[in-house]
Image (spheres, rainbow, N blue to C red):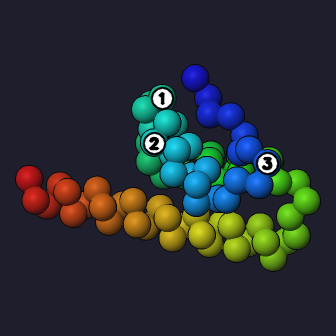
Amino acid sequence: MPVDKPKKGETQDKYLAYCIPEEINNGMEQDQAVAVCISKYEQGNTNLSTNERVALKMNGIRLYNELTKDVKDISEKE
């Protein structure tokens, strides 16, 4: 089941923290889930300026890199 748009006033970090894992559980690859969730967050915040949208994408990339690093660290320990 698709994840809902963010709640009013919800931060991007909080939204992505539950959206990404849910989309992965729904069968998406991690990078696709990140892109979809960032897009949903932007759609739910239509009043954002261009600079704010760029900042959100940069933050999403940072979060994706952190997630990827965590997965890599776990797989290297196994």
Q: Nearer the viewer, mark 1 or mark 3?
A: 3
Question: Mark 3 sits on what residue?
Answer: 8
Nearer to me, 31 or 44: 44
Distance, label 2 to label 3, CA atoms, is 21 Å
* Label 1 with label 2: CB-CB less than 8 Å: no
Task: Give the vertical position of 8 relative to 56 (above or below).
Answer: above
Looking at the image, residue 78 sits to the left or right of residue 37; the answer is: left
Task: Give the vertical position of 57 relative to 14 (above or below).
Answer: below
Q: Amino acid at mark 3?
A: Lys
Q: Residues within 10 Å of mark 2 (few under 14, many from 20)?
A: some
Residue 40 in sight here: yes
Distance, label 1 to label 3, CA atoms, is 24 Å
Residue 28 in sight here: no
Nearer to me, 13 or 73: 13
Check residue 26 in the rendering and tell me which mark sits there, or answer none.
1
Q: Amino acid at mark 2?
A: Pro
Q: Which image quadrant for residue 74?
A: bottom left
Q: Earlier in the sequence, mark 1 or mark 3?
A: 3
Looking at the image, residue 48 sits to the left or right of residue 71; the answer is: right
Check residue 21 in the rendering and tell me which mark sits there, or answer none.
2
Q: Earlier in the sequence, mark 1 or mark 2?
A: 2
Q: Which residue is depicted at the point 28% across and 56% down?
A: 71
Q: Residues within 10 Å of mark 1 (few under 14, many from 20)?
A: few
Task: Give the vertical position of 18 relative to 51 (above or below).
Answer: above
> In x, y percent, where is residue 43?
80, 48
Q: Nearer the viewer, mark 2 or mark 3?
A: 3
> In x, y percent, where is residue 20?
51, 46
Q: Residue furthest top?
A: 1
* Label 1 with label 3: CB-CB less than 8 Å: no
Q: Amino acid at mark 1?
A: Asn
Mark 2 secondary-structure assignment: helix
Mark 3 secondary-structure assignment: loop
